[in-house]
Image (spheres, rainbow, N blue to C red):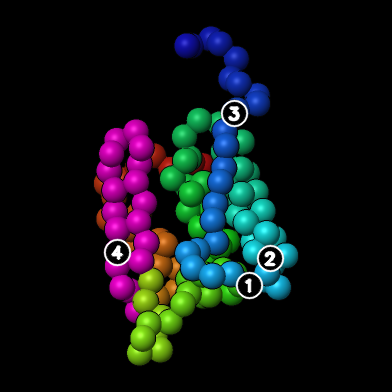
Amino acid sequence: MAGEPEDQNPRFFVAVHVGAGYHSSSNEKALRSAMKRACLAAASILRKGPGGCLDAVTAAVQVLEDDPSTNAGRGSNLTQDGHVECDASIMDGDSGAFGAVGAVPVVDQVFRMPSRLLPRWPRSK
């Protein structure tokens, strides 16, 4: 309500995963580091207050796709023909708007493509 102080400690929860399939136990430290950095990237946006959820998701996924130890983006599994093809989707839980792409070959930061298919949403500053 107008006139009420803004919550100085917004409550939120961030969880990520590093891709489907087998992950070697020798890669566990790198994967845990990637997940922690992704959660921290999202949390830094969410701490700014309400809104910005889609921006927080995008920040987390960017960390994961840029890390070659994950099964996403740069670290994707190869197709049967030895090529990288990525799928990505995003959904705004408030409006139900969503965007998705599939089998996208060799695109840097494929995670940004689905958000371009969404109607414009208010982005955090």
Residue 28 badge: 2
Q: Amino acid at mark 4?
A: Val
Q: Amino acid at mark 2?
A: Glu
- Where is 26 relative to 41, above or below? below
Q: Residue at x 65, y 24 (%)?
A: 8
Residue 74 badge: none
Residue 24 badge: 1
Determine the secondary structure under disc 4.
strand
Q: Which residue is mark 3?
A: 11
Q: Amino acid at mark 3?
A: Arg
In magenta, the rendered stretch is 87-105
The number of numbered badges drawn on the structure is 4
Queried whether the magenta region covers residue 10, the answer comes back as no
In space, the residues marked 4 and 2 are separated at their CA atoms by 29 Å
Q: Amino acid at mark 1?
A: Ser
Q: Which residue is mark 4?
A: 101
In space, the residues marked 1 and 2 are separated at their CA atoms by 7 Å
